[in-house]
Image (cartoon, rainbow, N blue to C red):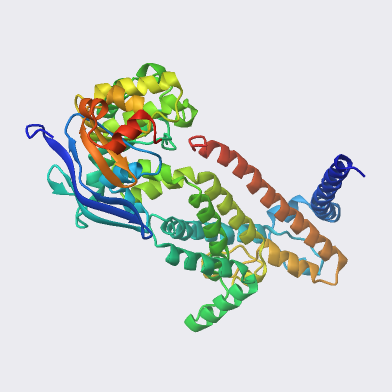
Amino acid sequence: MDITHKRTLEENIFKGLMLFSLSVVIGSLIIIIGLVIINGASSLSIEMITQTSSGGYYLGKGGGVLNAIVGSLLLALPATLFAYLIGLGISLFLQKDLTHPKISSFIRLTLDILWGIPSIIYGIFCLIFMILIGIGTSLIAGIIALTLLELPIITRYMDESIKMVPMGLRESAYSLGSTKFETSVKIVRRQALPGIIAGVLLGLGRGIGDAASILFTAGFSDRIPQSLNDATAALPTMIYHLYASPIPLVRQRAYAAAFLLLIIVLTISILSRFCTKKCTKFVIR
Amino acid sequence: MENNKAIQIETKHLSVSYNKHSVLKDVNIQIPAKKLTAIIGPSGCGKTTLLKSFNRLLDLREDVKTSGKILVDGQNILNPKLNVPQIRKKMGLLSQKPYPLPMSIFDNVAYGLKIHNNIHADQLNAKVQECLQEAGLWNEVKDRLHDPASGLSVGQQQRLCLARALAVEPEIFLCDEPTSALDPIASQQIEKLMVKLKKDYTVILVTHTLRQAKRLADYVIYLYFGEVVEQGPAQEVFSSPKKEETKAYIKGDIS
């Protein structure tokens, strides 16, 4: 085989492998969504979204998952906000012009390790803490566990985005007499906004879908939480409880709950594209 | 240098090294006020480092060691107790690649005004217009002041950076090869602006284009690998240089 043919063949094999990988990924997504829709759509009714779990819900009688939907939002949204605020401070601080590289690489290593910690460990850590200070399963404990879970994800993502802000832009801001605070918050943060938004949404998606960290901390409940001390259900824990049932009808409801969770995550994703477009029109490319 | 010309910046035994690698060695120069001083020399000889030492931008790197004194209007700006943002406010920077801030055209110019002053909206509008007019950009942007600055051409962005620097009322302009990324027409516009600027501001221009230095400079400093070879009025240095190395560089033997 001459060299031209060999190179063409290599090219075609490589394209083939890429297409194969693409189809595995897209195929998996389609199968997951398909399974959830096919199994879940039949049990999905307006009751599911508008009613909380009533007595007997877990035995196949009527009711809904409103408590879980509200619980998920009440847990994930504040957790993401706290993780964003703390994470922003950390990621702005890690920059070359503010911190010595040895310190910042140590902090980044710590964050990477924290990112890799399984979420159930965060749950157990918070549980130990809760026992020590004497609070039971509650909304506040769940929020804290999720904040800890989302923090390294959001921070590292924002950090990578902020690292890419060119030094020349920072120098321009400093030469106008900006302080380090002004340059970080008014200039660097604005330039890194697309990456910051992506990081926050990644964190939110992770938080809203996690069950292990809130299992011991947020607990479970049939009711919508009225205060920070109330235990609460969330869609992932609700799916777990429903699917563990021996009653087929109740297991169907697990799929319906999974479908609802998917819709919420998809909505967040679409809203984020809108938001990114609007908020990033001033970014220097 | 003649004694009756006011010296705005003077360096005494200034040495800068990056990670133990010496970039500037015992530099002693004088930069006169309200004139255009060109710093010339081959690539990599420390011109940009010298320029960035004047407004303490070198502080942003952690591996830099500086020794000696830099006197701006008699005050040593290398004193660690000084308020660095105030020092920097005195000096506008035009870099090789213009970096507009990630904001609208209006906000780019207004940024400096807002961080240093408590300024009212109508005063702000007037001042922004004035700066854009001085930079020769007003007519091109007056109908799209709130559009993103990233939409401007490179030449317009450089003029915007000039307008933005003018807004904080500096005394000195540090220009680091400001026309090297621009096409000939845009370069000409910037050069005309620099000639206008030197009437009211001290301009320090780093350039590796000898022709540009000959066109614009009142005083010249020739830097060769971190050492000052010759400095003096442009007329003298270009027509009758005292040192052999200067002669060689000007003739084009070293580039």
Height in image: B146 above or below B142? below
Height in image: A78 above or below B141? below
For the point 29% across and 35% down, the residue is B246
Horizontal relation, residue B170 to residue A164: left or right:
left
For the residue pair B7 and A161, the one nearer the viewer reads as: B7
Horizontal relation, residue B49 to residue B236: left or right:
right
* Image spot of residue A195 (x, y percent): 55, 48
Give the quadrant of the N terminus of chain A: top right
For the point 52% across and 59% down, the residue is A155
**Residue A78 seen from this side:** no
Height in image: A203 above or below B154? below
For the point 35% across and 42% down, the residue is B48
Horizontal relation, residue B97 to residue A110: left or right:
left
| Rendered image quadrant of residue A40 | bottom right
The residue lying furthest to the right in this view is: A1
Height in image: A67 above or below B245? below
The residue lying furthest to the left in this view is: B4
**Residue B248 seen from this side:** yes
* Image spot of residue A169 (x, y percent): 42, 42
| Rendered image quadrant of residue B164 | top left
The residue lying furthest to the top in this view is: B139
